[in-house]
Image (tube, helix red, strand yellow):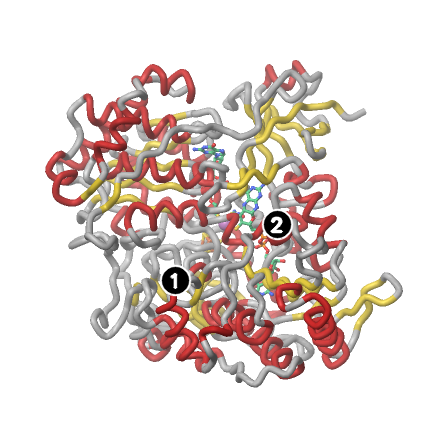
Amino acid sequence: MTTDVTSPPRPLGRDAPSEQAGVATHCAYCGLQCAMTLTGASAADLTVSPRRFPTNRGGLCQKGWTSAELLRTPGRLTTPLVRRDGQLAPASWDEALDVVSDAIVRTQTAYGRDAVAVFGGGGLTNEKAYQLGKFARVALRTSQIDYNGRWCMSSAAAAGIRCFGLDRGLPFPVTDIGSAHAVLLLGANPAETMPPFLTHLVRAADAGGLMVADPRLTPTAAKALDGGGLHLQLRPGTDAALALGMLHLAVTEGYADRGFIAERTSGFDDVWAVAAQWLPERAERVTGVAVTTMRAAVSGLARARDTERGAYVLSARGTEQHASGTDTVTAFIALALALGLPGNPGTGFGTITGQGNGQGGREHGQKADQLPGYRKIDDPEARAHVASVWGVDPADLPGPGRSAFELLSALGTDGGPHVLMVHGSNPVVSAPDARVVTERLAALDLLVVSDFVLSETAAVADVVLPVLQWAEEEGTLTNLEGRVLRRRKALDAPSECRSELEVWSELARRIGCSTDFPTDPRVVFDELRRASAGGPADYSAVTWERLDAGESLHWPCSAERPQGTPRLFLDAFATPDGLARFVAVDHAGPVEADDTAYPLVATTGRVLQHYQSGAQTRLVAELAAAAGDMFVHVHPDTAEAAGLADGDRADVVSRRGRTRAVVRVDDDMRPDVVFLPFHWGGDARANSLTHAALDPTSRMPEFKACAVRLEAVA
Ligand SMILES: Nc1nc2c(c(=O)[nH]1)N[C@H]1C(S)=C(S)[C@@H](COP(=O)(O)OP(=O)(O)OC[C@H]3O[C@@H](n4cnc5c(=O)[nH]c(N)nc54)[C@H](O)[C@@H]3O)O[C@H]1N2
Ligand SMILES: Nc1nc2c(c(=O)[nH]1)N[C@H]1C(S)=C(S)[C@@H](COP(=O)(O)OP(=O)(O)OC[C@H]3O[C@@H](n4cnc5c(=O)[nH]c(N)nc54)[C@H](O)[C@@H]3O)O[C@H]1N2
Ligand code: SF4
Ligand SMILES: [Mo]
């Protein structure tokens, strides 16, 4: 048994640990945070069974089913490693932490506080994400902290804040989507990236109302077509043109909700000034999506809205991971607003958060410009509040630092950081223009990686700290719907592994910081509650006791809203005037033009079996076998033109590097596009090709479009 996505709905909403023997927890991987029960006393005999929960309705994907393999992989790090004579060699914790603390003190004395940097991850629990931000600002007193969520949710977040005044990926429970008859998915492939999510799309698919905008005919798009829905097979990076063309049609064909626009939004006229120029024929020329298809998509959404059958627009990384990602999401929000979808029951706009704690991880201070509770680090009131919780002088808190790629590309330069601590990311594989990032990592005086497996980034570190994973520790995560969940401990870690909370506490002490860094996650969470109180992401009334009793708590959850907020914006948007904002944006398109030397657009993404940089899932034999090797999807004519056939090995070459892959000829590809997954390193690293043109607002790199050619490999 592998993928179970068709379990019938059961009574939902409880997350209490009691109903079965074993430990009730949530999956090790993505933001859907499917519920599971772990049974067994040791890693060797631990088994996974799915558990009833609204997001997964009793289903798990193949990664979830096999997640216990991570706990018993021979690839597990079981002792600290320190580089000596060029080799990573086992060391004691004392030795390893001494190397790190000595380097921190030495480097900050020589170059200043910002010479030590921190890179976090959206897989860290809330407690760790919070504590990492505090460790950076209070112990290291560095401004140089950012995290991999910058490459994930930043454009969606920036657009949400811009238009709604708040960023919670789904401002409604995922189950609301389940009753909708029309769902427009933008650059999202949940059939592979969140298989149990499909249970929430069954009704729309059956009604012929599932619509998927993706350059590829993905399993998700195929599902839409099977039910009589739509596949909008656009050229990569043309989503904003699609949004503006659809907005044009919504208005000219009379689908705009004039009452909603007048009462609940501002700025429509400015947006219309741009959208009026986007005649649908022009949008068709740019995107490759037929006017009839755009018209059918707009009328499908409007019809479902008018008959109260539910209509949602949901975006994911295909639309967002561009140097114009924020504007693109902004344009689709404008479409959704024109149709009157956000802020009403049964309809809405949302973005699908990717990482396990991709939502909570972007709220509590890992971001360069942020303090806990989704506060801004340059806001004097926010600084005063958080400094009082931390027991420090607000003037001692650093200001904003560099964003992820800007941070990594400054490493080892004059004025850039010389020591980097990585917690929960594998940038050697997953960073844009990864060759440059790898060179910068090599230029550091000290690279410290905390992980439980020897990722490609850990392999080039000077110090590797073996930390706890997933089922070995307690904590909370916040899933894609802003619901806070309990992650529970099911077994003891190998004896030499330590919690990151202990690592930060010990390092703070060693570098002479007088602030206490608690190591009990429950104590850390209580502090997080206080630090978040009054901020946009307010967790102050969430307690572990309430979560353990099975209450479902979506933030904001405070004294004013003790039951939490499953649905945001029903009364007002989170802007100062309560109105959602139409923001005028135009189509920009991919930064890198194709030409005769690089005539194809490469886009990148995911396969079902592998998670992210693959550091974890490549160690799970069943997943590695099922996923096969690095491949490139190519249209048959395009393959032929390059002298390639199905199964051949090819080099995909961009202006920055090359990636070796097996050719998979696919009739359903656009001839001008190739697709590569990014789950492998070395020669098979997709990010040797990508480039780091950054979105001006979110600082998101352009993972989803670069110019390439194919070369046959002898
Ligand atoms: N199996 C698996 N599941 C995962 C993950 C994983 O690594 N593996 N990671 C998790 C995380 S962190 C994330 S962020 C989510 C990501 O979840 P998704 O966003 O669903 O995943 P991607 O494959 O990155 O991109 C989705 C689709 O965008 C399409 N696309 C590419 N370029 C464009 C474009 O220019 N426009 C449009 N409209 N579409 C385009 C791709 O063809 C792809 O099918 O998945 C989560 N779940
Ligand atoms: N070309 C291309 N590149 C992409 C993307 C794309 O679509 N295309 N997507 C981007 C996106 S959306 C994302 S989210 C990133 C993700 O890419 P990465 O940031 O590399 O994420 P992971 O592979 O999940 O890396 C997590 C590492 O942290 C470890 N880890 C997991 N949990 C913990 C923990 O609690 N503590 C510590 N210390 N370590 C832990 C894992 O073992 C693994 O080695 O990739 C981005 N890169
Ligand atoms: S969909 Fe995500 S949370 Fe659910 S089992 Fe798969 S990886 Fe885990
Ligand atoms: Mo992500």
Number of numbered labels in the structure image:
2
Determine the residue positioned at 61% across, 47% down. Answer: 431
Asked which quadrant contains residue 338, the reply is top left
The quarter holding residue 43 reads: bottom right
Q: Residue at x 23, y 72 (%)?
A: 562
Q: Is residue 254 above or below residue 132?
A: above
Q: Is residue 632 left or right of residue 122?
A: right
Q: Nearer the viewer, mark 2 or mark 1?
A: 1
Are the residues flagged by discs 2 and 1 in contact, CB closer than 8 Å?
A: no
Residue 86 against residue 504 in the figure, above or below: above
Q: Earlier in the sequence, mark 2 or mark 1?
A: 1
Q: Work out which residue is located at the far right of the displayed protein and give it.
A: 85
- Callout 2 amino acid: Ser
Residue 613 - label: 2
Query: What residue is at 34 percent from the left and 30 percent from the top?
Result: 243
Dot 1 falls on a residue whose secondary structure is: loop
Q: Which residue is mark 1?
A: 374
Whether the residue under disc 2 has CB within 8 Å of ligand 2:
yes
Q: In what element is the residue under mark 2? A: loop
How far from the left and from the top, in percent, is residue 247? 27, 28
